[in-house]
């Protein structure tokens, strides 16, 4: 599904989950845009559709643009649910995302917090923890 600048996918049965900017958060997976970016997005999309990740994910609609970093955003419904946040991290690692991953609340995004200090959780490269 597309909406403005982003391609979205929602998990079956969770499409009507009420979005709450105070509780929702997201793992930010930055990948280098190249010919394999679509394969990474397809892996995330498939994992969301099969219920292995959170309720939704998104990627910029123009992600095939080579030579830049592209965020794949994987949502969870409650940033305070550390068990669920960890479960999603482990699945992202199983999908092959081995680099540094950051987790940010939607409230931080809406407040305009970006860059250093904006993350709620950080997982070091190759780590299964945060």
Image (tube, grey):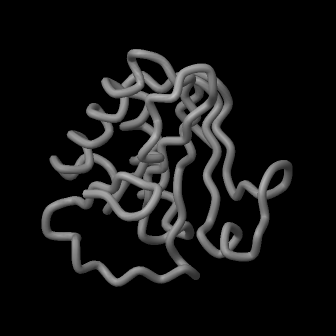
Q: How many marks?
A: 0
x, y percent for residue 43: 28, 32
Is 90 rendered above or below residue 127? Answer: below
Front-most of 87 and 73? 73
Specify the farthest residue to the right: 116
Q: Is residue 34 left or right of residue 48?
A: right
x, y percent for residue 14: 22, 70
Q: Is residue 110 left or right of residue 4?
A: right
x, y percent for residue 46: 21, 40
Is 31 rendered above or below residue 113? Answer: above
Residue at left offset 50%, top offset 71%: 24
Front-most of 33 and 116? 33
Residue at left offset 42%, top offset 70%: 77
Q: Please identify the quarter of the rendering in which residue 83 is found.
A: bottom left
Q: Quadrant of the N terminus?
A: bottom left
Q: Please identify the quarter of the rendering in which residue 108 is found.
A: bottom right
Q: Quadrant of the C terminus?
A: top right
Residue at left offset 23%, top offset 79%: 16
Residue at left offset 48%, top offset 42%: 72
Is 98 rendered above or below residue 114? Answer: above
Q: Please identify the quarter of the rendering in which residue 96 is found.
A: top left
């Amino acid at each position: 599904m597309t909406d403005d600048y982003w391609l979205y996918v929602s998990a079956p049965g969770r499409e009507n989950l009420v979005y709450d900017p105070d509780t929702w958060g997201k793992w930010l997976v930055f990948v280098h845009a190249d010919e394999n970016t679509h394969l990474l997005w397809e892996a995330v999309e498939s994992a969301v559709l099969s219920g292995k990740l959170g309720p939704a994910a998104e990627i910029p609609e123009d992600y095939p643009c080579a030579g830049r970093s592209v965020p794949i955003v994987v949502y969870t419904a409650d940033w305070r649910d550390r068990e669920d946040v960890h479960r999603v991290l482990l699945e992202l690692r199983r999908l092959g995302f081995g680099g540094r991953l950051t987790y940010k609340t939607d409230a931080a995004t809406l407040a305009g917090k970006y860059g250093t200090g904006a993350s709620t959780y950080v997982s070091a490269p190759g780590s299964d923890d945060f």
